[in-house]
Image (cartoon, rainbow, N blue to C red):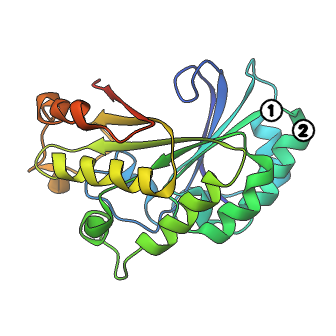
Amino acid sequence: MRIASIIDISLVDVPKIPVTVIFTAGCNFDCSYCQNAELIPLLSGESMTIPDIVDRARGHLVDGYCVTGGEPTIHKDLPEMLKALKEDCDCHINLNTQGSVPSVLERSLPYIDSVWFDMKASPTRYVKTVRTSHDPWPRIQQSLELLLDSDVLFWPRTTYVGNLTTPDDIKAILETLHELGFRGEYLVQNYIDSAGTRDEEVAAFERPNRDEIEPLFSSLPSGISMRLEWR
């Protein structure tokens, strides 16, 4: 597996749980607003064996791990790494994913306690947003259904990008989640420029105005709440 970095401790990646964060390298999406754009190339990071990853990640004052990227599920040995982490500490394991590789996600489920699921756009706008040659939505829907049928804590979220994302996108995502049977909290966080973005890609984007989507609170689907996290 290719690993970009391992952060000893984070208090913000998993609610109320201090975790060590493992950044996998490589992604099969090319979102223009990506905050970790240096991790998109498939040959970024360095190749590490699973025992080396576990050895490097253990020993910190944490109660679990957050595995993020990049996109962790593009690595076919992700389930083996998650299993090794679970066997090493029997602690909370959180996965961040955009859901485009349901086969790997399904094999990972026995070793995961929670998932942050990044919904990039409304179903009809995925290709434009993630810039892939084929529509990834059918695979993403499959991943959503796998999670909703599991016992894993499932936390969907969307990054709202000024001049890219629209209130209609958020409305469509809410409706899609409801149709798939999701009940719970949906997080919408604002896009912010950072050192990890590509200057030429984000030149047209801006910090969004939360007033654009606050009217949606009056018509949320039954069983779904929405939280806005403007940073």
Taking 15 as reference, is 179 left or right? left
Quarter of the view holding residue 229 = top left
Residue 19 coordinates in the image, percent (x, y): 66, 27
Residue 176 coordinates in the image, percent (x, y): 38, 56
Residue 75 coordinates in the image, percent (x, y): 65, 65
Q: Is residue 42 visible?
A: no
Which residue is at 83% across, 40% downward?
Answer: 55
Q: Quadrant of the C terminus?
A: top left
Q: Is residue 60 visible?
A: yes
Q: Secondary structure at mark 2?
A: helix
The image's mark for residue 88 is 2
Q: Secondary structure at mark 1?
A: loop
Which residue is at 77% across, 50% downward?
Answer: 82
The image's mark for residue 228 is none
**Residue in front for this viewpoint, 135 or 147:** 147
Task: Tell me the kind of residue under disc 2.
Answer: Asp
Whether residues under marks 1 and 2 lie with C-beta atoms below 8 angstroms apart, the answer is yes
Quarter of the view holding residue 195 = top left
Taking 200 as reference, is 121 left or right? right
Q: Residues within 10 Å of mark 1 (few under 14, many from 20)?
A: some
Taking 84 as reference, is 70 left or right? left
Which residue is at 64% across, 60% downward?
Answer: 146
Q: Residues within 10 Å of mark 2 (few under 14, many from 20)?
A: few
Q: Quadrant of the N terminus?
A: bottom right
Residue 210 vs 175, above or below: the answer is: above
Residue 202 coordinates in the image, percent (x, y): 17, 50
**Residue in front for this viewpoint, 174 or 161:** 174
What residue is pinned by disc 1?
A: 58
Whole-Å distance between the Cαs marked 1 and 2? 8 Å
